[in-house]
Image (cartoon, helix red, strand yellow):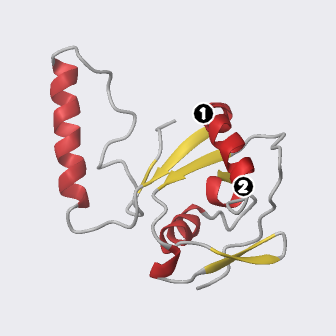
């Protein structure tokens, strides 16, 4: 797999960042690796796919990713960080949800969900969605529309 670029792990992010929410999957499914601060790190295939789709070849992008920003070997740190995750996500410039690579049924599921939300909206029970299945990129990413 081509390089995803470099990334730096920082304990505190002092500037704008995006937070990534994704399904972990199993590290055993495959063994892709990325480089963080010059060190090779094994990641799940799903995280690798998300990073590949989120990369910005023209510049830097700061992402907060729990599997990389929280020491998964330290239960005490994990416990403290998990308690802070709501704040981390709230302070992010945006939260990106990665559901995985598109499948044959992805469009069907998103169109059904969109129809349901539109029906609720017509009944005055729900705000309009910020992203529709038709607006979403083919990569499986749903991001709020600006």
Is 41 on the left-hand or right-hand side of 49? right
Q: Residue furthest top?
A: 124
Label 2: how many Cα within 10 Å (few below 14, some 14–19, many 20+) = some
Residue to which mark 2 is pinned? 69
Residue beneath the point at 40% across and 34% down: 130
Is mark 1 in CB contact (under 8 Å) with mark 2? no
Q: Percent from the top left, x then y, of residue 140?
A: 39, 59
**Residue 101 position (above or below residue 80):** below
In the displayed structure, does residue 127 sit left or right of residue 92? left
| Residue 93 in view in this figure | no
Task: Judge by depth and name the residue closer to the eye, 46 or 113.
Answer: 46
Q: Residue at x 38, y 51 (%)?
A: 136
Q: Give whichever of discs 1 and 2 has the lower sequence position.
A: 2
Tell me the residue at 62%/31% (across/down). 90
| Residue 24 horizontal side relative to residue 33, left or right | left
Which residue is at a point 62% across and 46% down the rendered structure image? 19
Instruction: Answer whether residue 66 is visible to the viewer in this image.
Output: yes
Q: Residue 45: x and y, percent?
A: 50, 74
Rounded to the nearest angstrom, the CA distance separating label 1 from label 2 is 15 Å
According to the picture, the residue beneath numbered tag 1 turns out to be: 86
Residue 25 position (above or below residue 112): below
In front of the other: 99 or 25: 25
């Amino acid at each position: 797999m081509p390089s995803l670029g470099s990334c730096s792990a920082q304990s505190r992010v002092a500037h704008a960042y995006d937070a990534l929410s994704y399904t972990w999957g199993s590290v055993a499914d495959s063994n892709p690796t990325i480089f963080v601060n010059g060190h090779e790190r094994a990641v799940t295939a799903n995280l690798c796919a998300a990073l590949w789709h989120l990369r910005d070849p023209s510049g830097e992008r700061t992402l907060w990713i729990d599997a990389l920003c929280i020491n998964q070997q330290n239960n005490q740190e994990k416990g403290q960080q998990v308690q802070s995750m709501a704040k981390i996500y709230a302070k992010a410039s945006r939260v990106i949800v990665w559901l995985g690579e598109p499948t044959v049924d992805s469009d069907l599921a998103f169109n059904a969900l969109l129809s349901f939300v539109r029906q609720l909206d017509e009944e005055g029970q729900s705000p309009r969605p910020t992203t529709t299945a038709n607006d979403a990129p083919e990569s499986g990413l749903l991001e709020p529309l600006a």
